[in-house]
Amino acid sequence: MKDASPASPPQTFYLKDYTPFGFDAEEVALTFKLAPEATRVISKIRFTPKADAADPRFFLHGEELKLIWAKIDGAEVAPNMVDGGLDCEVPAQPFTWEAEVEINPKGNTALEGLYMSNGMYCTQCEAEGFRKITFYPDRPDVMSTFTVRIEGDEPVLLSNGNPCASGEGFAEWHDPWPKPAYLFALVAGELVNHPDRFTTKSGKDVELNIWVRPGDEGKCAFGMDALKKSMTWDEEVYGREYDLDIFNIVAVDDFNMGAMENKGLNIFNSSCVLASPETSTDANFERIEAIIAHEYFHNWTGNRITCRDWFQLCLKEGLTVYRDAQFTSDMRSAPVKRIDDVIALRARQFPEDGGPLAHPPRPEEFQEINNFYTATVYEKGAEVIGMLKRLVGDAPYYKALDLYFDRHDGQACTIEDWLTVFEDATGRDMTKFKLWYSQAGTPRVKVSESYADGKLTLSFEQQTAPTPGQPDKAPRVIPIAVGLLGDNGDEIQPTRVLELTEAKQSFTFDGLTSKPVPSILREFSAPVTLERETTNAERAFLLAHDTDPYNRWEAGNALSTDTRLRMVLEGAAPDADYLDALTKLVRDDSQDPAFRALVLQPPSQAQIAQVLFEQGHTPDPAKIYDAAETFTQSLAQALSDSLPRLYADTTVDGAYVPDAEGSGKRSLNGAVLSLLTRLDGGAAAAKQYEAADNMTLQYAALACLLRVEKGDAQSQAFFDQWQGDRLVMDKWFALQVATTKPDTTARVARDLCDHPLFTIKNPNRFRAVMGALAGHHAGFHHIDGAGYALLAENLMALDSLNPQTTARMCAAFQTWKRYDAPRQQMMGDALRQIMARDGLSRDTAEMVSRILDA
Ligand code: B3K
Ligand code: ZN
């Protein structure tokens, strides 16, 4: 069995066509006889036809499977092999389907289904990978209990649920919780575990393990701690307990994404679980903690309650991202987490929402669902939950969540189910709010204000630009959190949430004694672009005084963006008042170092390009780069007197602890070092590199040195020290590209593709180089076109091996229409060249054609 041949027209799936499967799958028993190139999978499934089936066809998905035999109620049958699976005549009563198939895990470079990574068997079934393991109704609304027997020589044999038997060369597992096939997992290999235990609040004793390759045992303690914290947090905040006797996490080197929430057997990209002070940065630690939490939280939001179909993906992903963000806020600094999330949303989701790939959080059609694991489904999906909570209030939110868990446990649900729970729990009509799930595009909200006789009126106008397939947009419900400040910085009106529901709407605040300074969209209360005529003096005031930390940061960010825009558009010098406000804040030791580091972090060059595009300009990557360089140099000069002291004061003494306090201080320390490097030619960075006893300091120093072209010796030393560690080498590869000057970026990336340690087959290594290339705004978009050509070449080479990772990286071209004619031509050529390739995967074909069709 093969995929639909690429020459046949691609099939599009529509939300409106949803039809339930005509059979219940009552019990699934699977036996795996493992062999690298010829694994046998024997399935035995009890099916019951549904009395009122709208579609009585017995169709089982199957791809790349060799059918050995099939039986119904013990008698051999010859099913009808069709595109994407098989169908078969079946009895009208309950029956048992059995089949044996052969698959080739070793030849599976797509890393979907059962595959091998460094000699170890592992699986990835979400979204539609189970159909590469056996014939099955591979859709999330078919839920069943699974019993799995694994036969193989590997010392460790794992699957979902609880272990029930094991012996020489085999192990058996039973998962009592009905689940869709996408949550199936199997792992077999030579693994060692980092064990622990957890007692749930109702007294259930749970065995915990993190399984890794021998040699990585020392990198599990942090992840285990994060897991236990997540388990406690979900009990305390959402009242959710774990429900099996064992919870296993496995680290795998070759993995298309971050991690996967398979029931009781989470599989992780090793980069998202292995951590040690010597090999991981502060950012790695924080990310690992969040991903462990995210996958664990899926046990309830995703596994116990799953999605009816893949159009509902944001039901589990948006909610789980929202929950992991709450967790991080509780474990670390809530304002810092919020600011980080807004930066990421603007960097990843806003460009998606304003370009050819725009789609609503609940898309209505797709060709390849893997192409919809996007920032919109995940991050905007989480923002929608945040708005919901803000609109109904905290206690009603948790009341609705309790109802959701009570009512829908064990079901495959829809966004309608989710919103009905809120209607029933709070009495609120969610009809208009639901537009957030069906409309794409980032709303632009214009606000103007007038003040007279102690009355402030804020007038809002909302508007959303057309997106592919959605020319007209209706006004949405937008919660806008507003506070008012007096001239002395006092809060004269605590945060109030205005509910925008119309295209135009005004709100009045009265009883004021003087004209206040409004602080609007506090905490970034909605994923919109706010437009407001204001002065830089007012922004500086808010940067100094706003009591909402997010809006304080945002005032600084707006000042910084404004300065940079004027530098790009008018050739202006960096704004002196802004530099002054910034330097004051950075020197102010009474402020949180993490916050100061965030204020110091300039908007990325891609972000400046995004804002220029939003304002109707054609971004010039070279000018944007020059402005960024000039700005940083000016900032370093403006702060020159204070930098050595700031550097010394933010140096963290003692043993490395990856907590919020230490990492906040180190992030300011790193920002200061990079400015200092501009002035001292790398002297401080070289010293830091020598003395560093943790990766955060070592990596920061190396990055600073490479940026000023003084890091050759350290780069070699770094390579020599870490060449045996794949994850650290990924950092080395990425840094070589990220620190280049724009005219050498593509050349350096090309040379790295010939490096003996480069391999296109490992997604982490591929992303290290190609992701760094695409992420270097001025380098990727260099007018010589070498960046575009190199990426296209590599995407074409990867497509036949790993369509999923290829398709994802095509998004680097999504902004092509924003640039000048020569760049558009070159990017268009690159896209057309990919599109013309013989045998292009449906993943990549869908992405490229959506980008080209815009
Ligand atoms: N649910 C998985 C993602 C699966 C991606 C499939 N292409 C990880 C997560 O969101 O937790
Ligand atoms: Zn998820």
Image (cartoon, grey):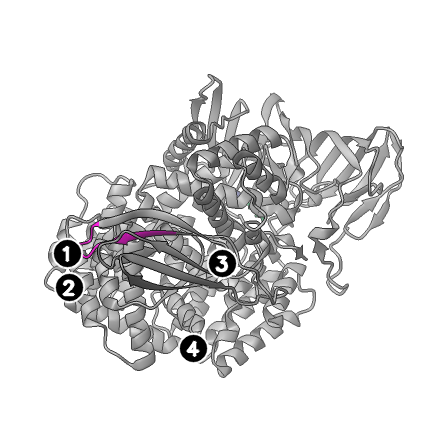
Which is closer to the viewer, label 3 or label 2? 2
Q: Secondary structure at mark 1?
A: helix
Some atom of ligand 1 lies within 8 Å of the CB belonging to the residue at label 2: no
Q: Amino acid at mark 4?
A: His
Marked residue nearer the N-terminal end (3 or 2): 2
Contact between marks 2 and 1 (CB within 8 A): the answer is: yes
Above-or-below relation of 158 to 313: above
Contact between marks 3 and 2 (CB within 8 A): the answer is: no
**Residue identified by numbered label 4:** 617
**Residue identified by numbered label 2:** 639
**Residue identified by numbered label 3:** 766
Q: Amino acid at mark 3?
A: Phe
Q: From the viewer's perspective, is 854 left or right of 10?
A: left
- Callout 3 crowding tier (Cα within 10 Å): few <14, some 14–19, many ≥20: many
**Closer to the camera, 389 or 670?**
389
**Residue identified by numbered label 1:** 587
Q: Amino acid at mark 2?
A: Leu
The residue that appears at 49% across and 28% down in the rendered structure is 240
Instruction: Confirm whether the magenta stretch covers residue 682.
Output: no
Some atom of ligand 2 lies within 8 Å of the CB belonging to the residue at label 1: no
Tell me if residue 270 can be seen: no
Q: From the viewer's perspective, is 449 left or right of 90?
A: left
